[in-house]
Image (cartoon, rainbow, N blue to C red):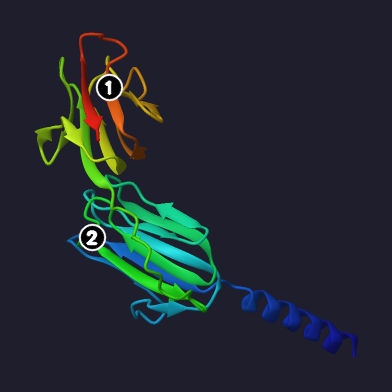
Amino acid sequence: MRTLLAAAVLLSAFSGAAGAQSPTLTATVGPGFQIRLADGTGNAVTHIDPGTYTIQVEDKAAIHNFHLTGPGVDQATDIEQTGSFVWTVTFVDGRYHYQCDAHPTTMKGDFTVGTAPATTTTTPAPKPISLGARVGPGPTIAVTRAGARLKTLAAGPVVVVVRDRSAKDNFHLAGPGVNRVTSRPGKSTVTWRLTLKRGLYTYRSDATPSLRGSFRAV
């Protein structure tokens, strides 16, 4: 009798643990210009129930990233980083969006959770502008947009891929609401997600005062 009771207790505990396991979704970006969020059966996610989910992220391209946003959620891989990642995300009723920050108008998707709120007529948030920044090799420093040196741009969200290719110099960006810097010494590539306000922004190397430039957000 005691053996049967112990077996029943173990079976109940095992069943409870299995039942508590989070559902799994799969997020994929790359290797081409593709981005997708799929459920456990491989179908594209368009609607799911509220709750905590495990997301297996497969970032297969060094020119893309996977960025998931929505009520209580803001998770992203780096644009120049590839690899496999595991996120634990709790979804609530609402609308969620995913995109590649480098190609937000073409690589994107949306889904709803639970009882999504009615669609409103509010103006959608502006998409981030993609910028490039570099320092080195040698005595060079610049901020560019689509390959051209940046002079002005509209205020708002930006994604800046900073390539620090100098073991001596660093990249230091400062302006209204922004003061970001790469490490010195050492080389690195980092991605900054910033919101630029109207005003003048300057960039420089803290090691070489003559390496500097500026642009204006309008």
Left or right: where does residue 159 sit relative to residue 176? left
Tag 1 residue? 202
* Image coords of residue 179 (percent x, y): 39, 26
Tag 2 residue? 30
Callout 2: SS: loop
Task: Write the residue at 54% across / 69% down.
Answer: 92
Amino acid type at circle 1 is Thr
* Image coords of residue 176 (percent x, y): 37, 28
Task: Write the residue at 40% across / 73% down.
Answer: 119
- Camera-near label (2 vs 1) is 1
Left or right: where does residue 208 sit relative to residue 121? left
Quadrant of the rendering where the C terminus is positioned: top left
Task: Write the residue at 28% across / 26% down.
Answer: 201
Left or right: where does residue 188 sit relative to residue 68? left
Name the residue nearer the viewer: 103 or 11. 103
* Image coords of residue 3 (percent x, y): 85, 85
Name the residue nearer the viewer: 211 or 137. 211
Residue 34 against residue 63 in the figure, above or below: below
Quadrant of the rendering where the N terminus is positioned: bottom right
Query: Looking at the image, which residue sits at the far front?
Result: 121
Residue 161 against residue 39 in the figure, above or below: above
